[in-house]
Each structure stands twice: as C-alpha cells, then as structure tokens.
Amino acid sequence: MNDDLRVQYEIYPYPPRDPEEEANRLITGSPSHIAEIEHHIFAGTRPAADTLNILVAGGGTGDATVMLAQQHASAGISVDIVHLDISEASSAIAKARIDARGLDNVRFVQGPIESLPDLGLGPFDYIDCCGVLHHLADPGAGLKILRNALALRGGMGIMVYAPLGRNGVYHAQAMLNMIAGNAPDDQRIATAKQLLSNLPASNWLKRNPHVGDHTSLGDAGIYDLLLHRRDRAYSVPELVGLLQQGGMRPVNFTDPARYEPSIYLADRDLIEKCRPMNWLQRCAFAELLAGNMKTHILYAVRDDNGNNTLAVPDTPDAIPVMRDDDGLTLAAQVKPGMSLNIDFEGVKVSLPLPERAGDILALIDGEHPLSAIHAQMENAPDWENFKRDFDRLYGSFYGLSRMFISKPAG
Ligand SMILES: C[S@@+](CC[C@H](N)C(=O)[O-])C[C@H]1O[C@@H](n2cnc3c(N)ncnc32)[C@H](O)[C@@H]1O
C-alpha cells in the first residue's frame, strides 16, 4: 500500500536538509512550536506529568522533531519524542540532525503510521503530523489511528494541503501522469523539468506565485510537488469532514487572522452579512475570499475531550508570551496610532493596534502576568481600559501567531 511512497522518500527525502546546518540555525515553524502547543492544546498550562510523550508522525528529515527536541530541552522540559517514518533515508537525516545537537530526547522508529497500533507506543500528549495525512491511502483512517494513540487530554498539530493556493499543481501532476506516468523516476524528473520550462504564460502553475518547491528545493522539491504518487488537498469544509472521520475536534488554525473574512473586506455591509456565520463557516468563507491558502495548519483535540483547550487572556494572571519577537524591541518600533501591516502572500492587510501598544509591548517578557504589566505601566488607565487595549493588541498579534497566552499551573 505504501511501497511507491516509501521508495519516493528513500530517494528524495523531504524536505532536503543538511545535518551540518544545525550548527548555524534552528528551523522553527508551525505546527508544533512550543508556545503554540501550550496555547492551543494545554490551555496555557503544561500538564504536570514528569515527561511529555510526543509523536512526530511522518517526521521526514526532522524539522518538527528537531524543533520540539531543542525547544523543550532549552526550556528544561523533559520529553520523550518518537520520530516515526516509513523512510529509512529520511529518518537517518533526522537522526543526524538530533545527534549534531547532542540531544538525547528522541527515539527513531521506522514504519508506517498504519502500524502504530502494533508498535506498543503511546499514549501521547502531543502528536505532530505535518504534510503527511494528505499522502495516506486512507487519511481518515490514518487520523483515527493517531487519535487513538493520543492521551485523553492530548492534542495534535496538523498540516494538510489546501486547494486554492496550489492552483496549477494538480494540473501539472495530471499532465505529467499522462506523458510520464510509468517512466522511471529520473525520466519523470527530466520530463517535469521539460514541461516546467515550456509552460505557456496562461498556465495556472506558471501564474501561481504561492508555490515554489519546484524552483527552490531541487529534484526532491519537483518530485514532492509535481510527481507525487498520492497527494490531495482539503478545503476548510473538507478538512472539518476529515477531522470528524478521525474523531477529532478543531481548536484553531494558525494564523487565525487569515481565517477572518473581515480582514479582507472594506465594505461594512459585506462584513455585516458575514457576521451571522459560525467560526468554521467564516474560515471557509475566508479561504474562498483570499484564494491564496496553500496549506491549512491547525490544532485539534480528541472529540471526547470536552475541555476548552485554547488559552485566552480572560484573567489577570494570564501571561502574554511573544513567540519570536522581543517585546522591548517591538515597543521601540510601534508608534501611537500605528496599525500592524502585513502581507499575507500578496494580500496587504492592516490589523488595529491600541494607542498605547508600545507601552504594553515594552512590559511583555513572557513571565509577568497582565496584572503586573498593568501595575507597572506609567500613567496606567483603569483595569477595564487597560484590558480593552490589551485585548486589541493581543487580537492582532495572536491573529498572526506572534503572541500567545500562558497560565500559571493550578
Ligand atoms: C512531505 S514529507 C513531510 C515530512 C515532515 N513531516 C515535514 O513536515 O517536514 C512526508 C513524510 O511522510 C512520510 N510518510 C508518508 N506516508 C507515511 C506513512 N504511511 N507512515 C509513516 N510515514 C509516512 C514520508 O516518508 C515523508 O518523510
């Protein structure tokens, strides 16, 4: 069932990575950034367990495994990470990256996700499954297997392809299937390169500025994008259906602002017309409206976990945490009256900031709660006005996955 796919990832481990680069940089991203997991899965508070059990399902060449292992080690949090992949070559690269960092919190298991019930692993507090479900023979069944390996209060970070931003990819895949479907891999790659350099200006892939693996990641990128044996994309409603099949409930997407129709709309009447829609309907509308989403990254929990797992800044003990930015540095750049301007892959949007955004940002250090930030502010407004300003600031930075909430343990 997985033979063609395994061979592909033995020959073209994806994404291509050089373990020597670990000395120069840590690749971070979504899903599975440590601050995102705490925020979306653990309501801002890590479970008290001595060691967190984590599975990276289809871990490939190790981006998520390395990030999870390094971020938890740096934070002094004990984790037992299992990196599971069908490809020996990909796992070997991931292992070399972990070894290069001198980390000892990862185990490597070679095998298909479908065999998880027989491997005696888990239950896991967190599962990363990035760019894998859409390649499985039965994604719903694969997701269910992962879900059944989750602890009741555990959760998952998932990335799947989205159709609109990949416009032209499936056209190119179909053409290559017609002219080189059964050829050996080196010929398929050669034919793909030939086709790429002959695409007319009107071709959708040629006109699509959002996908670039075929130009930036060499043969592995061409293969993964255009010659994959099994690859499908999910719209928001289709993804919701997949989660239901897998027994999972969505918590939120990253970056949430992209899934909010009103950020793209200037017409007040249209914004009003969208207001009655529920959260997932708004997300579906925003996907259709923006037209440029090439993946969906979301956090999800078991459908029998009735808890609210998303952290919200609802109490004075909530601690705002910047994901990568430094509050003080940002504060120096933010002037009163400014908005947060952002380019979402070709769509320029402005997110509102409160008048005193800089004063609040300067006090955010990832350790002090809102009550202390309020107390330390010069000429502080009363709590209600401070909280209104903070919520506005938070709404914009959280919308871009740049600020999260941490809560002190109970
Ligand atoms: C596109 S790569 C993504 C790698 C990694 N998750 C990342 O985001 O960088 C897909 C990976 O899934 C693995 N894979 C595909 N089908 C699998 C299966 N049924 N069980 C386990 N791994 C699988 C492949 O070997 C490959 O390494």
Image (cartoon, helix red, strand yellow):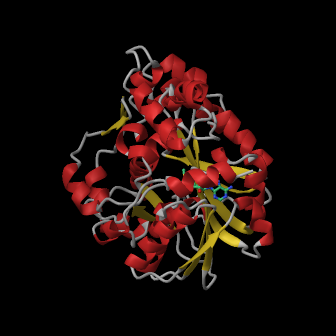
Q: Residue furthest bottom?
A: 50
Ligand 1 visible in quadrant: bottom right
**Which residue is at a point 60% across and 24% down the rendered structure image?**
178
Residue 372 % position (x, y): 38, 70
**Which residue is at a point 40% across and 82% down the rendered structure image?**
102
* Left or right, 90 with reference to 113: left
Residue 379 % position (x, y): 26, 59
In this view of the protein, which residue sits in the foreground, 380 or 3?
A: 3
Residue 52 falls in image quadrant: bottom right
Residue 299 visible in image: no
* Left or right, 276 with reference to 20: right
**Which residue is at a point 45% across and 81% down the rendered structure image?**
103
In the rendered image, the quadrant that contains the C terminus is bottom right
Residue 375 % position (x, y): 35, 68
* Above or below, 271 relative to 43: above
**Which residue is at a point 27% across and 68% down the rendered structure image?**
24
* Above or below, 247 relative to 163: below
In this view of the protein, which residue sits in the foreground, 78 or 280?
A: 78
* Above or below, 260 relative to 315: above
In this view of the protein, which residue sits in the foreground, 114 or 166?
A: 114
In this view of the protein, which residue sits in the foreground, 35 or 318?
A: 35
Residue 396 falls in image quadrant: top left
Residue 353 visible in image: yes
Residue 378 % position (x, y): 25, 62
